Amino acid sequence: MVDIGSFLALDLRVGRIVEVEDHPTARKPMYKLVVDLGPEIGKRQIVAGIRGAYTKEELLGKSVVCIANLDPKAIAGIESQGMLLAAGEADTLISLLTTDRDMEAGSKVH
């Protein structure tokens, strides 16, 4: 179980994917993304293992729910500065979490 304080420590934001590239050195299919998290946070580089589920064209401009306050982590040699949230069990059967209305980049998720 997670207490409410631990949950509230997560900074969940709406981000808009503004750049998508193949991760050049990853062993599994990954993208290197640039996600705009709004004027307060700015743009972040995020590495995501979603290449089997989405094309670059599908991702570009998509609004997604992100964790904005994770410690940076190197993934196959590239720093990832956040995480996209997704549902599903396999690399090809996942769905990114989005909003059902057009929200501004950087909007807080409660």
Image: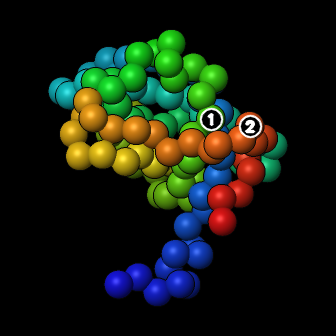
Q: Residue furthest right?
A: 39
Q: Which quadrant is the N terminus positioned in?
A: bottom left
Image vertical order of residue 13 relative to residue 11, above or below: above
Q: Amino acid at mark 1?
A: Ser
Residue appearing at x 37%, y 48% in the figure: 87
Q: Which quadrant is the C terminus positioned in?
A: bottom right
Q: CA distance from mark 1 to mark 2?
A: 8 Å
Q: Residues within 10 Å of mark 2 (few under 14, many from 20)?
A: few
Quarter where residue 24 is shown: top left
Residue appearing at x 78%, y 41% in the figure: 104
Residue 99 percent location from the top left of the image:
63, 44
Asked whether the beta carbons under mark 1 and mark 2 sit within 8 Å of each other, the answer is yes
Q: Amino acid at mark 2?
A: Asp
Q: Nearer the viewer, residue 90 or 72?
A: 90
Name the residue that disc number 2 marks.
Answer: 102
Residue appearing at x 64%, y 52% in the figure: 13
Give the secondary structure at mark 2.
loop
Q: Nearer the viewer, residue 84 or 32?
A: 84
Q: Nearer the viewer, residue 81 or 65?
A: 65
Image vertical order of residue 104 relative to residue 32, above or below: below
Name the residue that disc number 1 marks.
Answer: 63
Q: How many marks?
A: 2
**Of the image marks 1 and 2, the number of the one nearer the N terminus:** 1
Residue 2 percent location from the top left of the image:
41, 82
Determine if residue 44 is in view: no
Residue appearing at x 71%, y 57% in the figure: 108
